[in-house]
Amino acid sequence: MVRAKARGLDANRVLDLGIYIIISALVGAKLLLLVTDFRTFKADPHELLTLARSGGVFYGGLILAVVVALWYIRRVGLPLWTTCDVFAPGIALGHVVGRFGCFFAGCCYGKPTTKPWGITFTDPFAQSNVGTPLGVPLHPTQLYEAGAELLILIVLLVTERRGRPFPGRTFWLYMLLYSISRFIIEFFRGDERGTVFMFSTSQFISLLLAPLAIAMLVYLSRAKTPEPKRARKAA
């Protein structure tokens, strides 16, 4: 809301948008988990109950949240890219917190490693809940991603008003940096998360997202017509 007010946006509209994003992100994350682990759920329908306690796949939440946000932004007349810029650092910060949740739960675990920073899980509940290997040092991929998101957050905030800012720059820079970091971290993941061709589902999405983000940054940087500074006030 503070970021919205600083950019001349209706903070109440932005708060409402945030609520829509939270709900759609939760639903989207679980839907993509259902798709990527479909064989597991098909073999044992009782496993569908795990969706209630699973966080889901981040990209699924991101994609559905973006779709819902675009609908709401158009519906109430908020300036599209300025509004997206308002939310971008919050997405990164939320992902930092979320990955610590993954770490504490034992999900989204890494492959076995001999590195000195390998993490060994010992709680049987983690294994029964999400299949976490016990007694084996694993790459702490949850912390890798939390660290990457923290760095992305810092980059977004530091560069936001430097150079030649334009609406959409912060949002698409986040998309670019996240897709690159996620593609790399996926090589160290050890959990089942679906494949598309020779890539994991998230790597495949990253391969599509990174060039799209670059194209949008180039396109928006050359746009001559600025976005309106204010949106319609909430009734």
Image (tube, rainbow, N blue to C red):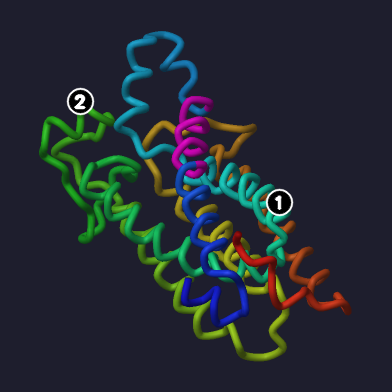
Specify few, some or many for label 2: CA neighbours under 10 Å numbering under 14, 14-19, or 20 or more. few
- Relative to residue 94, is residue 8 depicted above or below? below
Q: Between residues 94 and 78, which one lies in front from this camera angle?
A: 78
The answer to if 83 sits in the magenta stretch is no
Q: Residue at left 51%, top 30%?
A: 31
Does dot 2 land on a helix, a strand or a loop? Answer: helix
Q: Residue at left 78%, top 64%?
A: 215
- Relative to residue 176, is residue 218 depicted above or below? below
Q: Quadrant of residue 216?
A: bottom right
Q: Which residues are magenta?
A: 24-35
- Relative to residue 126, is residue 9 depicted above or below? below
What's the mark number on residue 128? 2
Q: Between residues 7 and 37, which one lies in front from this camera angle?
A: 7
Callout 2 touching callout 1 (CB < 8 Å) = no
Specify few, some or many for label 1: CA neighbours under 10 Å numbering under 14, 14-19, or 20 or more. few
Residue at the disc numbered 1:
75
User: Residue placed farthest to the bottom in the image?
Assistant: 163
x and y, in percent, of residue 161 in the image: 60, 88
Q: CA distance from mark 2 to mark 1?
A: 44 Å
User: Residue placed farthest to the right in the image?
Assistant: 224
- Mark 2, mark 1: which one is toward the viewer? 1
Judged left or right of residue 227, residue 181 is: left
Q: Earlier in the sequence, mark 2 or mark 1?
A: 1
Q: Residue at left 32%, top 20%?
A: 49
Judged left or right of residue 74, residue 4 is: left
Q: What is the three-letter code of the residue carrying label 2? A: Ser
Judged left or right of residue 219, residue 191 is: left
Q: How many marks?
A: 2
Q: Quadrant of residue 4?
A: bottom right
Q: What is the three-letter code of the residue carrying label 1? A: Arg
Does dot 1 land on a helix, a strand or a loop? Answer: helix
x and y, in percent, of residue 100 in the image: 28, 55
